[in-house]
């Protein structure tokens, strides 16, 4: 107990919350994580019950290698876990009886956080970038806008192309449709029109999505070459 109180005293001034699990009078586990204010918060939004936090009358126990150890009391399961210097973790609290597994809980949390981080890193958020044209746009400005659109599509974002009609320009919406079609044709190599140009009030909008990337260009080239080598039926 002295070691437990010493730990609490040492950390009292630096952490706002401490989660401690004491097992077999020889094991103290503190699960701590810092934020940018150097305070402590829970590692996971949903913590599993572990070790002495498991208070069920009976539990079904799975060993660390996945083998079934049968139904027993939490005290008996804890003895098996602590003899292996591992933790007892409740993985299926809704089952009858609840299912617990013997594992290294710290390692489990680390690997879980690593997987979540990797999944988050591989995610790509699709944004909608806007390119504004006009029905009197000149060639240089048109090409500049086109280059911006190509860059957005190559990065995997969708494109919203807009034209704002002012004053008497509303009398000739066909000029806006001509500019939109010209833009769609010029960017067709990199994107496909997802929503055709449509006049909404004083604004004309068109949406373009990036073309799916070719997964294996070499394979596609090989298929095209083999198709060209095939003899004609004529």
Image: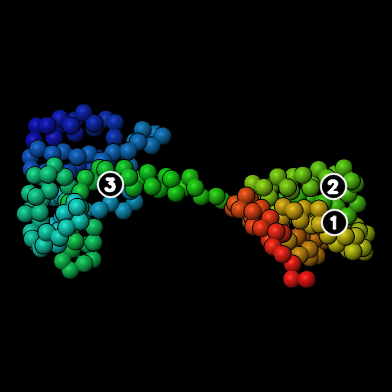
Q: Is 92 on the left-hand or right-hand side of 134?
A: left
- Sequence-first tag of 2 and 1: 2
Q: Secondary structure at mark 1?
A: helix
Does 177 sit above or below residue 157?
below
| Residue 27 lies in quadrant | top left
Helix, strand or loop for disc 2? helix
Find disc 2 in the rendering and name its residue. Answer: 142
Whether pointer 2 and pointer 1 mark residues with C-beta atoms closer than 8 Å, the reply is yes
Which quarter of the rendering shows the C terminus?
A: bottom right
Within the image, what quadrant is residue 168 found in? Answer: bottom right
Instruction: Answer with the quarter of the image where residue 173 lies.
Output: bottom right
Q: Which mark is residue 22?
A: none
Residue sitting at x 72%, y 64%: 231
The answer to the question of whether label 3 and label 1 lie on touching residues, with beta carbons closer than 8 A, is no
Q: CA distance from mark 2 to mark 1?
A: 10 Å
Point out which mark residue 182 bears.
Answer: 1
Which residue is found at the position 67% from the left and 47% from the top?
154
Query: x%, y% of residue 163?
Result: 81, 55
- Residue that lies at the very extreme toward the bottom in this rendered image: 234
- The answer to whether residue 133 shows anywhere in this view is yes
- Residues under labels 2 and 3: Cα distance? 55 Å
Which percent across, then down, holds residue 92? 23, 61
Locate residue 101, reporting x and y percent: 19, 55
Q: Which quadrant is home to the N terminus?
A: top left
Instruction: Tell me what residue is drawn at x 61 percent, y 53 percent.
Output: 219
Mark before the other along the chain sequence, 3 or 1: 3
Residue 127 visible in the current orientation:
no
Q: Which residue is mark 3?
A: 108
């Amino acid at each position: 107990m002295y070691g437990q109180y010493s730990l609490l005293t040492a950390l009292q001034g630096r952490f706002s919350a401490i989660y401690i699990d004491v097992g077999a009078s020889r094991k103290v586990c503190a699960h701590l994580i810092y934020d940018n204010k150097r305070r402590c918060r829970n590692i996971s939004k949903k913590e599993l019950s572990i070790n002495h936090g498991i208070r069920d009358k009976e539990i079904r126990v799975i060993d660390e290698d996945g083998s079934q150890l049968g139904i027993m009391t939490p005290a008996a399961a804890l003895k098996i876990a602590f003899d292996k210097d591992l933790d007892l973790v409740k993985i299926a609290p809704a089952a009858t009886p609840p299912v617990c597994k013997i594992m290294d809980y710290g390692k489990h949390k680390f690997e879980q956080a690593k997987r979540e981080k990797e999944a988050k890193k591989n995610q790509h958020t699709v944004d909608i970038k806007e390119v504004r044209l006009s029905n009197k746009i000149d060639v240089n400005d048109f090409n500049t806008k086109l280059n911006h659109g190509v860059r957005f599509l190559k990065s995997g974002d969708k494109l919203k192309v807009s034209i704002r009609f002012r004053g008497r320009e509303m009398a000739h919406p066909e000029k806006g449709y001509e500019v939109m079609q010209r833009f769609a044709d010029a960017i067709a190599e990199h994107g496909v029109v997802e929503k055709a140009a449509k006049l909404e009030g004083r604004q004309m909008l068109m949406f373009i999505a990036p073309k799916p990337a070719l997964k294996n260009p070499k394979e596609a080239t090989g298929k095209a070459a083999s198709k060209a080598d095939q003899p004609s039926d004529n």
